[in-house]
Amino acid sequence: MECTVNWVPAAGMGFVAETGSGHVLMMDGAVDGGGRNLAPRPMETVLAGTAGCTAYDVVLILKRGRHAVSACQVKLTSERAESDPKVFTKIHMHFHVTGRDIPESAVERAIQMSHDKYCSASIMLGKTADITTSFEIVPA
């Protein structure tokens, strides 16, 4: 896996990342740090990537279990250390799963499997952060 990040001096503290798969992601800093607030902060992209990683796992596990999942939303809230390096110290993941007749045990199992085995991002962040989860199932 590869990624190249280039600073865009004309944008203050803006950066353009090009992923190995050929996609582009913009990042920017806060105004008080010289940025223009035109894109997510780098640490926000880490959090978003983690949510995407675990949501991908949960949907895939539910689909493989032949459950009729039609939507999955994950909302992450986090806390970071007060001093540098300002690593994540707490992350809570709340899953909102929509589908037909999905048992709670299947969602709980999918989240646990992602958290313990498959989601590389959350497993890495778990080295510095206490990660908790919750979920709700909404009938489709």
Image (cartoon, helix red, strand yellow):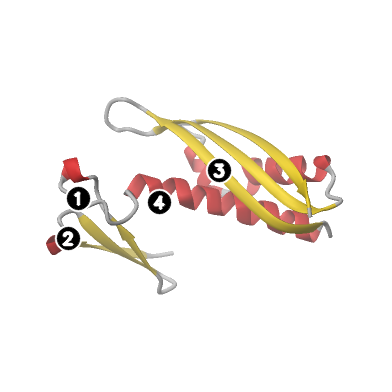
Q: Residue at x 61, y 39 (%)?
A: 94
* Cα distance between the residues tagged 2 and 3: 30 Å
Give the quarter of the figure containing the N terminus: bottom left
In this rendering, position of residue 47 left or right of residue 82: right
In this rendering, position of residue 120 left or right of residue 3: right
Discs 2, 1 touching: Cβ within 8 Å: yes
| Few, some or many residues within 10 Å of mark 1 (<14, 14–19, 20+) | some
The image quarter containing residue 17 is bottom left
Element type at marker 3?
strand
* Cα distance between the residues tagged 3 and 1: 26 Å
The single residue placed furthest to the bottom in the displayed view is: 22
Name the residue tied to disc 4.
45
Q: Position of residue 112 (x, y in %)?
A: 70, 40
Name the residue tied to disc 1.
35
Q: Residue at x 54, y 54 (%)?
A: 52
Name the residue tied to disc 2.
11
| Few, some or many residues within 10 Å of mark 3 (<14, 14–19, 20+) | some
Q: Which mark is residue 75?
A: 3
